[in-house]
Image (spheres, rainbow, N blue to C red):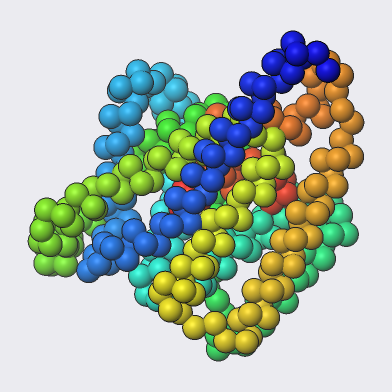
């Protein structure tokens, strides 16, 4: 290979490396989020989520103003269908945030991490139920393992692991709604609109907590106030990192990086928070991990079977590489949501966090 050709390829390698760093940053921050919630004690989950909504809107407003990016927000708000879908998405992500925060602050972070482990499997299941998708054998096997894991864990917990299921299904439906919006709203604009929709509820909650003396925002010192206020930055920065990663990485790489967040959450719960992990939970988690391994193998096989496009060509196969990831960054939302074209695609390609976690 000539030196000219080698130099031509260096930027691509550099962009790929930068994308991996952004991806690790995004999923790493989402994975370490439980530490932030613990630091916010004695604030309860309802107050934490209400503040997260309010401060996220403040941060996004400043960011949109500095970047002069109010155009997409204005267009989205003026489009009834998009505004309606983002309103539904806002309610779903609010449920997701509240359940996740409750799980972490109530000593059930292991079960909360399970929710994001099984989310890809739930997304595949939603593809069958909602979109009538036809699945391949490995995907059916993964669903079977996921359902078996829920039964095993229900026996181990003595009850249905509702925190994990609520997280997985709320985020799965959130992804379904966000894919209906498509690439018409970028990530920061989407977060801004969703938090704006939730702001009246969040403000009402804070007024109620203050009137009953249950609010901690102004009663635990300036340090607590500013840590709570930082929730806006902590919510938006990983999302921005994910967008930067998605523009630079193939979809398969994003799909593999997604597991970093629940792995970190699980390790924190096990080794830092000291939560118990009896044998039946290890069995249930092992079934989930085996199912995820099958989904990953199926994803890699599917990508390899895609016909390659020649130089200068752009087609359907090209969209299995960098372009869907770029679309994900433009469409706004969580990695779990935007990486694929449908719930099943999302599971294969990579899961709010962020939610927007």
Vertical placement of 107 versus 240: above or below? below
Residue displayed at 66% across by 78% down: 284
Q: Quadrant of residue 152?
A: bottom right
Residue 106: x and y, percent? 37, 75
Query: In this rendering, does residue 88 appear at all?
Result: no
Left or right: 199, with 151 as reference point: left
Image quadrant assignment for residue 67: top left
Task: From this view, report whether residue 256 is shown above or below residue 288.
Answer: above
Toward the front, the furthest residue is: 3
User: Which residue is drawn at the image coordinates 69% and 67% (left, top)?
Assistant: 289
Please say whether residue 338 is visible from this viewpoint: yes
Q: Position of residue 279 (x, y in %)?
A: 62, 87
Tell which of 69 and 76 is nearer to you: 69
Residue 331 pos. (x, y %): 56, 32
Direction from residue 47 to residue 118 in the image, left or right: right
Please identify the residue farthest to the top as the structure is shown.
Answer: 4
Q: Nearer the viewer, residue 87 or 2?
A: 2
Q: Which residue is located at x 57 percent, y 86 percent?
A: 278
Q: Is residue 27 left or right of residue 237?
A: right
- The N terminus lies in quadrant: top right
| Quadrant of residue 181 within the rendered picture | top right
Give the residue displayed 57% in from the left and 68% down from the top. Answer: 114
Q: Position of residue 309 (x, y in %)?
A: 85, 23
Task: Examine the rendered structure and indicate whether residue 37 appears above or below residue 234.
Answer: below
């Amino acid at each position: 290979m000539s030196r000219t050709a080698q130099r031509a390829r260096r930027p691509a390698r550099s962009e790929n490396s930068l994308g991996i760093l952004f991806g690790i940053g995004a999923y790493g921050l989402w994975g370490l989020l439980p530490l932030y919630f613990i630091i916010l004690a004695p604030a309860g989950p309802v107050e934490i989520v209400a503040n997260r909504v309010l401060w996220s809107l403040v941060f996004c407003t400043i960011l949109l103003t500095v970047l002069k990016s109010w155009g997409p927000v204005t267009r989205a708000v003026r489009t009834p269908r998009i505004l309606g879908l983002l309103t539904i998405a806002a309610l779903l992500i609010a449920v997701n945030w509240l359940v996740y925060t409750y799980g972490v602050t109530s000593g059930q972070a292991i079960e909360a991490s399970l929710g994001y482990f099984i989310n890809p499997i739930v997304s595949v299941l939603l593809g069958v139920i909602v979109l009538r998708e036809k699945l391949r054998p490995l995907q059916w096997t993964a669903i079977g393992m996921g359902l078996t894991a829920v039964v095993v864990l229900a026996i181990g917990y003595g009850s249905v692991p509702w925190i994990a299921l609520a997280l997985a299904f709320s985020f799965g439906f959130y992804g379904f709604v966000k894919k209906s919006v498509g690439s018409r709203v970028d990530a920061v604009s989407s977060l801004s609109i969703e938090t704006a929709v939730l702001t009246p509820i969040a403000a009402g909650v804070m007024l109620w907590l203050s009137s009953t003396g249950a609010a901690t925002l102004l009663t635990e010192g300036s340090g607590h106030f500013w840590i709570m206020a930082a929730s806006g930055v902590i919510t938006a920065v990983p999302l921005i990192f994910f967008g930067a990663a998605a523009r630079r990485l193939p979809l398969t790489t994003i799909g593999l990086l997604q597991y970093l967040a629940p792995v970190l959450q699980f390790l924190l719960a096990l080794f830092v928070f000291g939560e118990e992990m009896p044998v039946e939970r290890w069995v249930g988690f092992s079934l989930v991990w085996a199912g995820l391994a099958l989904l990953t193998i199926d994803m890699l096989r599917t990508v390899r079977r895609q016909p390659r496009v020649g130089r200068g060509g752009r087609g359907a196969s090209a969209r299995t590489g960098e372009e869907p990831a770029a679309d994900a960054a433009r469409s706004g939302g969580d990695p779990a949501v935007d990486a694929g074209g449908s719930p099943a695609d999302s599971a294969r390609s990579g899961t709010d966090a962020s939610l927007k976690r």
